[in-house]
Amino acid sequence: MNAQYPMDHFKTFKNKITRFLMVYKFALDEMETKIEILKEEFHLLHEYNPIEHTKSRLKSPESMMNKLIRKGCDLSLENIRNNIKDIAGLRITCSFISDIYRINDMLHHQHDLKILEVKDYIKNPKPNGYQSLHLLIEVPIYMSDGLEHVCVEVQIRTIAMDFWASLEHKIFYKYNEAVPLHLLQELKAAANSATALDQQMERLHREISEIKEANAAEEEEQLKLMISNQQFSIPSALLSLMGENKLNEK
């Protein structure tokens, strides 16, 4: 019996860890589904996709344990849940700075999500040059035994910001955070260059959009819809009916 107890104890602990991580995985799945719907909606209505790609990750149990130790907390699943808010992470990469705030607004309008915290490292970059918009979002997850409120960290950044952050991470990993001063200075200069590139691309994007809108206003074409790669024409009778309904509303 005594020989069997350690195995039973291990299985119980394994099940607790599995369930603990499972709810965070489901929260990421929920967020990625929401992002896909927003992408599709925006593409169909505006013929433009503000999201280049997304990437999600779960912290490993070892990483969570080390972070909890650094915070000076006792080791327990409850302490991990209460003190570590980036167990589930979702990174959204955009083409333009304006897209970042557009996605931020979209997420704020999801009424089942609760925005716990916003850190704007774009308007207020970190001293090393890091830029990104960070959101802590509470996601409701319905499990078989009840409702769980799960925290997900969402980072929204441009391609240039993401490229810089990836390079900075690789350099710090190689030097084990003891990075020579001249590399820190060059990294900061590179961050400034990335910011200048983002601002230039934002201006080009705005000017091209204005030209496109002006050209569209001059063209008189039959209205068409594209849904799931299927094209639909809008009959003139339906357009007339919609116009009459609009007049009646007034």
Image (cartoon, helix red, strand yellow):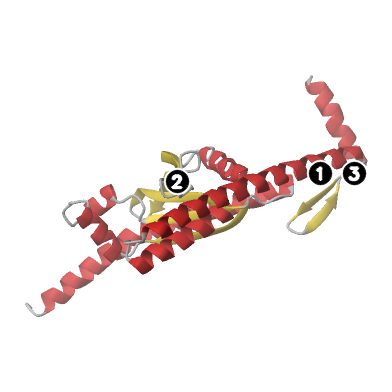
Callout 1 amino acid: Lys
Q: Which residue: 35% across, 66% down? A: 175
> How far from the left and from the top, in percent, is residue 79?
22, 51
Q: How much space separates mark 3 and mark 2, taking CA atoms?
A: 45 Å
The residue at which mark 2 appears reads as: 134
Numbered disc 2: secondary structure? strand
- What label sits on residue 224 in the rendered view? none
Is label 3 in contact with label 1 (beta carbons under 8 Å)?
no
If you read the primary sequence from the N terminus, does the residue marked by circle 3 or circle 2 appear first? Answer: 2
Kindly tell me whether residue 231 is visible in this rendering: yes
Q: From this viewpoint, is residue 77 visible?
A: no
Name the spot of residue 240 as percent of width and height, x first.
90, 34
In this figure, which residue is indicated by the disc labeled 1?
212
Residue type highlighted by circle 2: His
Q: Nearer the viewer, mark 3 or mark 2?
A: 2
Query: Label 3: which residue?
Result: 235
Disc 3 residue type (three-letter): Pro
- The residue nearer to you, when weighing 172 against 3, is 172
Secondary structure of the residue carrying tag 3 is: loop
- Please state which of residues 83 and 11 is positioned toward the viewer in this rendering: 83
Which of the two discs, 2 and 1, labels the residue nearer the N terminus? 2
